[in-house]
Amino acid sequence: MKTWRMFLLLMMLVLLTACGGGNGSSAEEEYTVDEATGLPLNPETIPEGDFVVEATIASMNLTPQSAPEFVLRIPSGRTYRVRAQALPDILYDDDEAVGVANFVQGMVVRATVSQVVGGPETGNSRQFVTDDLIVVR
């Protein structure tokens, strides 16, 4: 009987160790903070709330022009699919308008990204949106 108790105690210790000690806390990613906004910059894991991405355009869907969608690749290689403001409202960082024909893959952009949970038609999926995407020259 004493052998079973020792075995169970040993198994509980092994399981607690494997689960991080059982203190209920999980390791959180430490984010680089964007100096201008105080928000996480180019996070690897999706944080709670808004965050900033400085990335290159990996691909894009410019239709409809009122709600274009960009796949943005951060330096680590992680991508975010982001719905942006209308194309005429997207500017270069010096406030010059970006013509629709000037959008190309590889452009460097910066955006503050918000998370929106879609309705039943999207399967209640999380969508990333921005209303301040700018093209960095």
Image (cartoon, helix red, strand yellow):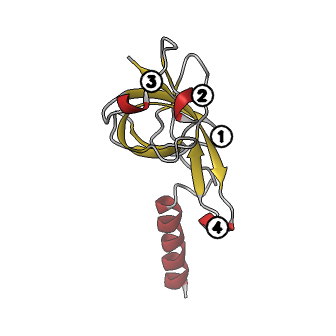
Q: What residue is shown at x 47% (from left), y 66% (from top)?
A: 14
Amino acid type, residue under disc 1 in the picture:
Gly
Q: Which mark is residue 39?
A: 2
Q: Nearer the viewer, mark 4 or mark 3?
A: 3
Q: Residue at x 61, y 50 (%)?
A: 25
Is label 1 in a helix, a strand or a loop? loop
The residue type indicated by label 3 comes to: Val
Asked if labels 3 and 1 touch by Cβ distance under 8 angstroms, the answer is no
Q: Are marks 2 and 4 in contact (CB under 8 Å)?
A: no
The residue that disc 4 covers is 121
Dot label at residue 98: 3
Q: Residues within 10 Å of mark 3 (few under 14, many from 20)?
A: some
Horizontal placement of 16 versus 61: left or right? right
Looking at the image, tell me whether mark 1 or mark 3 is earlier in sequence order: 1
Residue 64 x %, y %: 52, 47
* Type of amino acid at the residue the image marks with label 2: Leu
Nearer the observer, 92 or 88: 88
Tag 4, which secondary structure? helix
33 in relation to 70, above or below: above
Q: CA distance from mark 3 to mark 2?
A: 26 Å
Callout 2: helix, strand or loop?
A: loop
Separation of residues labelled 2 and 4 (CA atoms): 30 Å
